Image: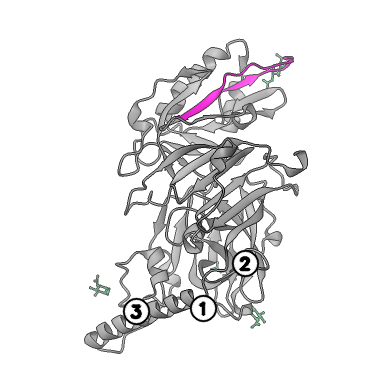
Amino acid sequence: MPTSLLFLLFLLLQAASAAAATFPLSISPSALDKWESINLAALSSLSRARHLKRPPTLTGKVTLPAYPRSYGGYSVIFSLGTPPQKVSLVLDTGSSLVWTPCTIPTATYTCQNCTFSGVDPTKIPIYARNKSSTVQSLPCRSPKCNWVFGSDLNCSTTKRCPYYGLEYGLGSTTGQLVSDVLGLSKLNRIPDFLFGCSLVSNRQPEGIAGFGRGLASIPAQLGLTKFSYCLVSHRFDDTPQSGDLVLHRGRRHADAAANGVAYAPFTKSPALSPYSEYYYISLSKILVGGKDVPIPPRYLVPSKEGDGGMIVDSGSTFTFMERIIFDPVARELEKHMTKYKRAKEIEDSSGLGPCYNITGQSEVDVPKLTFSFKGGANMDLPLTDYFSLVTDGVVCMTVLTDPDEPGSTTGPAIILGNYQQQNFYIEYDLKKQRFGFKPQQCDRSKN
Ligand SMILES: *[C@@H]1O[C@H](CO)[C@@H](O)[C@H](O)[C@H]1NC(C)=O
Ligand SMILES: *[C@@H]1O[C@H](CO)[C@@H](O)[C@H](O)[C@H]1NC(C)=O
Ligand SMILES: *[C@@H]1O[C@H](CO)[C@@H](O)[C@H](O)[C@H]1NC(C)=O
Ligand SMILES: *[C@@H]1O[C@H](CO)[C@@H](O)[C@H](O)[C@H]1NC(C)=O
């Protein structure tokens, strides 16, 4: 059973630098300083000129299918390069860098060495960098390199942007940053798009499409004013059904609030912190069967440092709650579920809980689970988003906690996973900095 996947913990600067090329310097430091400023000025002028001459072609909106995957995520097909090469990337609002498994002709490392989890590796498209006529490698002193490594990156020993290393909950990836054309559709081809060409990766199902709040993310690079998705139900297989991912750019778009979308404001992300890329929301309470669950307020509202509160993460499968939240929620649920038998063995083997044996019951009576956000919007989860038949006759709550971490106070206290977002229209309104949601049937064949 896949658990909380792809939770970006931190960006390892210059990880795996054993694989990085470093160049000995043969020019004097003062010459270097001058070269630095000239080079930087040249590069920023060039990238600005390119931008002014060829602004991203995306205007209005683009709709792409989002496919549920057996590993518990959703993936979207993009193309990279000229001629376009198709890549399949995990839709991830919990991280920002876009990366794809990649091969380069002269490297000892190619993603033939990558290990993939939960997918057939022969079905993973790999971007062949040398087959694209528009690919460019990134100098260390390029603004795009700074998007990923920060502005105080030390470029004195390397001309190339350093290797990136990303650690996720279960795996990791390392590679080189490049820029190339990102294709959203035949008509929407975005030049000079920054992404990672991963040469080593461990236990990653495929590449990642970062939709987080960082400078390198798809929304930031494309200047999106909003994006939204509707995720079809998981069946933990790769059946070809899909929901929509919609990207909007431009000043005017119809206000969806008129159509019954409820909104909660995004909280400002902490600067200079590994949490700066996350979409935070403040909660006012959590209700189980309409009853306010007692939770210390500091866990519901994020601090300036990003501790506490909820983040919305399409890359996690099941919602995670700190134990200090999970325990009272589970206790309140148990009060309503006393007529069913607890199935502890299934809790132990699945990592989910509480679980109940409902064999022989024609109907199961489960209390409503509601997230109540600051600002007044209430998110009532449909039963299938927080309770699931895990095995014959046994249902479990599909929310996780960390049994070994009783009182962690660092980082988000709740990570709203994609399982709890199924069959909702979910909107990230980047202009008004707010999270929108509305129950909706996402499988178009059922509309
Ligand atoms: C690209 O590199 C691959 C692997 O090294 C090689 O097989 C292929 O011929 C190269 N293609 C081009 C167009 O250079
Ligand atoms: C990559 O795989 C090849 C073939 O299995 C192997 O010879 C090589 O040592 C591997 N490289 C790394 C860095 O693991
Ligand atoms: C950059 O790195 C070089 C070599 O490691 C070091 O000598 C120099 O002091 C560093 N500069 C800064 C500003 O950290
Ligand atoms: C559920 O309860 C039924 C009847 O009481 C029993 O036969 C079955 O083994 C139980 N299932 C599990 C998974 O414990």
Direction left: furthest residue: 30
SS of the residue at dot 3?
A: helix
Callout 3: 10 Å neighbours few (<14), some, many (20+)?
some
Q: Is residue 68 visible?
A: no
User: Percent x, y for residue 46?
Assistant: 43, 80
Q: What residue span does the magenta drawing correspond to?
A: 354-372
Q: Is residue 338 visible?
A: yes
What residue is shown with label 2?
188
Of the image marks 3 and 1, the number of the one nearer the N terminus: 3
Residue type, numbered disc 2: Asn
How far is disc 3 from disc 1 in space, using C-alphas? 16 Å
Of the image marks 1 and 2, the number of the one nearer the N terminus: 1
Q: Residue at x 34, y 40 (%)?
A: 307
Question: Do the residues under discs 3 and 1 have CB atoms within 8 angstroms?
Answer: no
Q: Quadrant of residue 363?
A: top right
Q: Compared to 421, does 160 lie above or below?
A: below
What residue is shown with label 3?
40
Residue type, numbered disc 3: Leu
User: Percent x, y for residue 263?
Assistant: 49, 38
Q: Quadrant of the C terminus?
A: top right
Q: Residue at x 53, y 42 (%)?
A: 4
Examine the residues drawn in magenta and state their main secondary structure. Answer: loop
User: In front: 265, or 23?
Assistant: 265
Of the image marks 3 and 2, the number of the one nearer the N terminus: 3
Residue type, numbered disc 1: Gln
